[in-house]
Image (cartoon, rainbow, N blue to C red):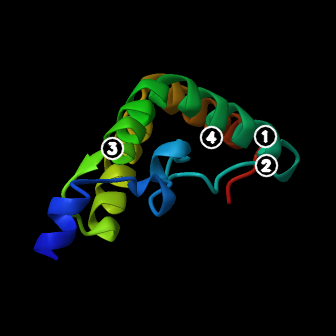
Amino acid sequence: MLQMAKKHPKRDYTRVIDAHKYAPIPASVGFTIPTIVGQVQVYIRNRADSFTIQKREHFGKELKDYKGFLVFQDKENAIRKDLSTMVNEDQQLRRCICDVRSSQVSRGINH
């Protein structure tokens, strides 16, 4: 392994870790009215993609020319956790989710 590290000091882990390509959807999806599920999911995906793009590009660059070895499952999980935290803490998405929940309650739909 030492010889391989000397001969090839950098590796492209973007082939095995794709967590940096997509922003995660918040964990609290599952409260929507069936007719608007698609619209809410598209909004959430677009919003999450827009504000996580720089972080995802950073991860992609880091993985593309990674110096040394890594346990890719651990790195992928760390990326997913970091991006999920960003998405789940986004105030605009939280307001959107609250608006959908309030709409359900006002219509008498409470699943």
**Amino acid type, mark 2:** Ile
**Amino acid type, mark 3:** Asp
Residue nearest the observer in this picture, 17 or 99: 17
Which residue is at a point 62% across and 29% down the rendered structure image?
A: 99
Q: Which residue is mark 2?
A: 33
Q: Residue 65: which numbered mark, if any?
A: 3
Query: Separation of disc 3 and disc 1 at Cα?
Result: 53 Å
Q: Which residue is mark 1?
A: 107
Q: Residues within 10 Å of mark 1 (few under 14, many from 20)?
A: few
Residue 6 seen from this side:
yes
Q: Which residue is mark 4?
A: 101
Q: Earlier in the sequence, mark 4 or mark 1?
A: 4
Which residue is at a point 64% across and 57% down the rendered structure image?
A: 30
Query: Which mark's residue is nearer the viewer, 1 or 2?
Result: 2
Q: Quadrant of residue 5?
A: bottom left
Q: Residue furthest right?
A: 35
Q: Earlier in the sequence, mark 4 or mark 3?
A: 3
Q: Earlier in the sequence, mark 2 or mark 3?
A: 2
Query: Separation of disc 4 and disc 3 at Cα?
Result: 44 Å
Q: Position of residue 15 (x, y in %)?
A: 50, 59
Query: Separation of disc 4 and disc 1 at Cα?
Result: 10 Å
Which residue is at a point 31% across and 40% down the rendered structure image?
A: 62
Q: Residues within 10 Å of mark 4 (few under 14, many from 20)?
A: some
**Amino acid type, mark 1:** Arg
Query: Separation of disc 2 and disc 4 at Cα?
Result: 9 Å
The answer to whether mark 1 and mark 2 are in CB contact below 8 A is yes
Q: Position of residue 14 (x, y in %)?
A: 46, 52
